[in-house]
Amino acid sequence: MIPYNKIYKSQKEEKYILDSLDRRQISGDGYYTKLVEAFLTKRFNLNKVFMTTSATHALEMAMLLIDLKRGDEVIMPSFTFSSTANAVLLRGAKPVFAEIDIETLNLNPQSLYNCVTEKTKAIIPVHYAGIGCEMGEIMDFANKYDLFVIEDAAQAVNAKFEGKYLGGIGHLGCYSFHGTKNFTSGEGGALVVNTQDECLIERADCIRQKGTDRSKFLRGEVPSYSWVDIGSSYSPSDLTMAMLYGQLQDIDYITMQRKRVHELYSSLLQKYVDKEIMNITKIPANCESNYHIFYILFNDSQTRDYVMEKLQQKGISAYTHFEPLHSALMGQGLGYNAGELPVTMKVSQCILRLPIYTELTEIEMLFIAESLEDILGGL
């Protein structure tokens, strides 16, 4: 069996976790949380980073920070995970689903014009597969209509758009370190605040600390801490941050190994692209990917399903991806129907993701390619 994903593991994670236990401080905002925040801030040239228990919680914090309220609207792609929309719904606001670009599977900036209304408060571009959205156009649009931009960079840690790290371009950014991601703590995430507004940063700190000014107390700025704002428990255990810190020490190696897989797939499958049997992941010239996903986009769902079934029979774990949110049960409850957003629907019906992880060997990749050649030859 060749799994779809396998987490990278060095000797550092165990070392740091045991050290965290020895330090007797395993709750939030401990020694390793501070190390991870400092690493991300310096590495990605970010303004302020708050570690969270998940990207889901980072998105929820972002909605609180922009004071999203009932009746507000937030534009986002339908081709994303439910957390993107749930963060909006939890504030009583409405997700407005936009179309994606068939070349990158990212939010199509031109579709924003069909979605914006006087109720629109924010845009959430989702950087699919570790490839950046057209952030220049999106930021220009947001500035024109005075909107917040919250980057859903859950899949895009250590990826860039026009030389800038994703998650650090919009007003706010959200990262994921879930077990399926390139760099993982099992569960975990981060909220990035990219503005210089000290009041916003202070409020993010309070929201993350259950609505209290506990951080001020720990810094000796107040004699005791109290309830000052709305909030929840968003800070991760220092044990999970110890594991993440171990992963981040090998960030370049992990990325290089995933790039190796990505490039071999691309070279082996290009002949099928030339024959117009499929399209594959494309990285625009103005983007640097973290190689989170390698996907094939077939011309129809029947071919996709046939190839997926045959690969799985050979012991190769290949999968589809998101059911579009607008066509899901919750989306239909918001008044959407499956007939809308035709590009999104076609992608969801025709996409197939191949195994990609650090330890995937060349022998395994060649077996996958040979299996695909055998399967596609029978079409």
Image (cartoon, rainbow, N blue to C red):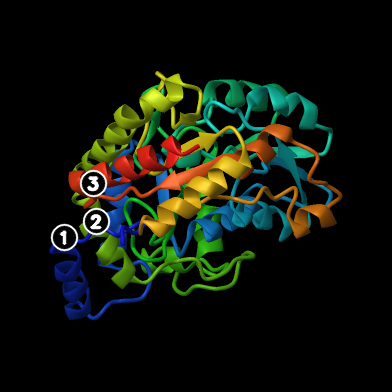
Label 1, label 2: how many angstroms apart (C-alpha)? 8 Å
* Residue type, numbered disc 2: Gln
- Distance from the alpha carbon under mark 3 to that under mark 1: 11 Å
Residue 10: which numbered mark, if any? Answer: 1
Secondary structure at numbered mark 3: helix
Residue 339 location, quadrant: top right
Residue where numbered disc 3 is placed: 254
For the view shown, which residue lies furthest in the right direction? 335
Residue drawn at point x = 21 percent, y = 52 percent: 359
Nearest the eye: 219 or 5 = 5
Q: Is 37 left or right of 128, judged from the image as shown?
A: left
**Which residue is at 33% across, 48% downward?**
356
Cβ atoms under marks 2 and 3 closer than 8 Å: yes
151 sits left or right of 330 in the view: left
- Give the number of the disc on residue 247: 2
Disc 1, SS: loop
Sequence-wise, the earlier of marks 1 and 2 is 1
Which percent across, then down, holds residue 228? 61, 66
Q: Position of residue 9 (x, y in %)?
A: 21, 61
In front: 173, or 334? 334
